[in-house]
Image (cartoon, helix red, strand yellow):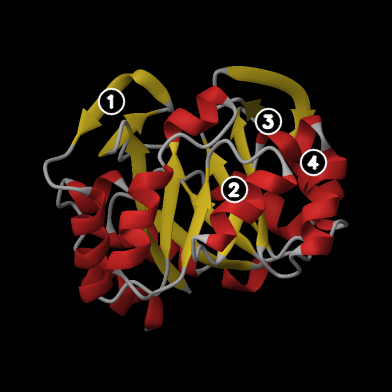
Amino acid sequence: MDVIPAIDLSEGKCVRLKRGDMADMTTYPGTPAEYAVRWQKEGAPILHVVDLDGAIAGAPQNLATVEEIMRAVNIPVQLGGGLRTVEDVKRVLDLGVQWAIMGTSALKNRAVVDQAAAQFPGRIIAGIDARDGWVALEGWVENSRVRAIDLAVEIGKLGVAKIVFTDVATDGMLRGPNISAIRALSEAVTTPVIASGGVSSLADVEALCDLADSGVTGMIIGRALYEGTIALPEAIAVAEG
């Protein structure tokens, strides 16, 4: 089970949100590249980078910062936020990003996801963010009337490499992941699922590891690492154990 640190970007800085609310943002000292180096040194197998400004704007906004991260580390990076076209995807993959995460476009323009998955096999991840079971869009500021599980089943048919499933209500709240929602979605698809949102303790890490048989292959941890409620090496040790 992969333990994947999150680096969320806004205006070139490393930040965290609560429940995806841009008005409830914590900015951390140090550059995103410095955090990337730290997580690599502490054993991270992958980094999860999100361009929050890009998610709102509908196009990448922090590519200079992404380039700094790519120059600083040699572990794989998955990047999301504002990747709505095949050209956007190609642009970030050309920077050295291993996987491009397509979220809003997965619902609003599925043909683009299909085209990207065909053009870049094994390098497209579908990002599905849900609030109370319904898909949230445009950096979580817009709600849909499409159920996350239904979207996951349809997107899985397009040949994406993985699905990152984020429960918006738990993200950044340090109250534990929505285990039942993650289990339900992962059992509904054959695509590997990475769980995101709410991990705040080693007990949460253990709980997500118990979902490995359901198809969960990784977990993303954000605020808990930055605020010290979880030490990355300990979380990795639990996941490997």
Residue indicated by mark 2: 165
* Amino acid, disc 2: Phe
In the depicted view, which residue is nearer to us: 147 or 102? 102
Above or below, comparing residue 42 to residue 78 in the picture: below
Residue visible at 31% across and 56% down? 68
* Amino acid, disc 1: Met
Residue visible at 65% across and 55% down? 90
Q: CA distance from mark 3 to mark 2?
A: 10 Å
Q: Which mark is residue 151?
A: 4
Q: Is residue 81 found left or right of 170 in the rendered image?
A: right
In the depicted view, which residue is nearer to us: 151 or 112? 112
Residue indicated by mark 3: 135
Which of marks 2 and 1 precedes in the sequence?
Answer: 1
Q: Position of residue 143 (x, y in %)?
A: 65, 19
Helix, strand or loop for disc 4: helix
In the rendered structure, are the residues bearing label 4 and label 2 in contact, judged by CB atoms less than 8 Å apart?
no
Q: Residues within 10 Å of mark 1 (few under 14, many from 20)?
A: some
Q: Residues within 10 Å of mark 2 (few under 14, many from 20)?
A: many
Residue 173 in view: yes
* Amino acid, disc 3: Val
Helix, strand or loop for disc 2: strand
Q: Position of residue 10 (x, y in %)?
A: 34, 32
Q: Quadrant of residue 223?
A: top left
Which of marks 4 and 1 precedes in the sequence?
Answer: 1
Residue 169 in view: no
Which of marks 1 and 3 precedes in the sequence?
Answer: 1
In the rendered structure, are the residues bearing label 3 and label 1 in contact, judged by CB atoms less than 8 Å apart?
no
Q: Position of residue 127 (x, y in %)?
A: 63, 46
Q: CA distance from mark 4 to mark 2?
A: 11 Å
Q: CA distance from mark 4 to mark 3?
A: 8 Å
Quadrant in which the C terminus appears = bottom left
Residue indicated by mark 1: 25
